[in-house]
Amino acid sequence: MKVVFDTNIYISGLIFKGGIPSRLMELAQDRKFSLFFSPHILEEIRAVTRLKFDLNLNERDRLIRWVESLGQVVYPSRTVKVVKSDDPDNRILECALEAEADYLVTGDKKHLLSLKQEFSFKIIAPAEFYRVIS
């Protein structure tokens, strides 16, 4: 099973330990599914952990290396413009398309979970994906 996590799953899993996003990251580490991410997702993790959580460069680099150990990087070859009000969310969709993902896991109710457009992957909330995988 191929999976892409939205940046908010990584942030919740890395910063706020103990919840479902943390458990999903543990399952990724245990190779219960194949996790994919793009350079954009890694850069967004770096930016959010610097700006919102004030992690220093060494702490951010350590987190990124750990995330990289969980899966495989893909380089999206196509551009989508589905989410008009939050363009970075389009980069998440592009990653899922390039990875040929089965699931895109996100906590973004406003932009991604509410999308009506059909994709080759299912956009799913963390709790729902946890029920699927466990």
Image (cartoon, grey):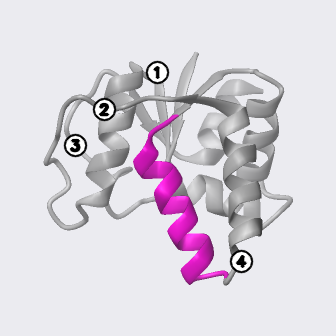
Percent position (x, y) of residue 87?
23, 60
Q: Which residue is mark 3?
A: 116
Between the residue at mark 3 and the residue at mark 2, the CA separation in whole angstroms equals: 22 Å
Disc 3 to disc 1, C-alpha distance: 17 Å
- Crowding at label 4, few (<14), some or many (≥20) Cα neighbours within 10 Å? few
Label whose residue precedes the other's in the sequence (4 or 1): 4
Residue for point 66% across, 52% down? 64
Disc ID at residue 102: 1
Is residue 13 visible in the rendered structure shown here? no
Q: Amino acid at mark 3?
A: Lys
Residue corresponding to mark 4:
56
Query: Label 1 is placed on what type of residue?
Result: Asp
Residue 37 drawn at (x, y percent): 50, 37
Q: Secondary structure at mark 4?
A: loop
Q: Is residue 115 visible?
A: yes
Q: Image point 38% across, 50% down: which residue?
A: 113
First in sequence: mark 3 or mark 2? 2
Q: Mark 3 or mark 4, which has the lower sequence index?
A: 4
* Residues shaded magenta: 37-53
What amino acid is at disc 4? Asn
Q: Is residue 66 magenta?
A: no
State the residue position of label 2: 76
Q: Residue at point 75% right, 67% down?
A: 58
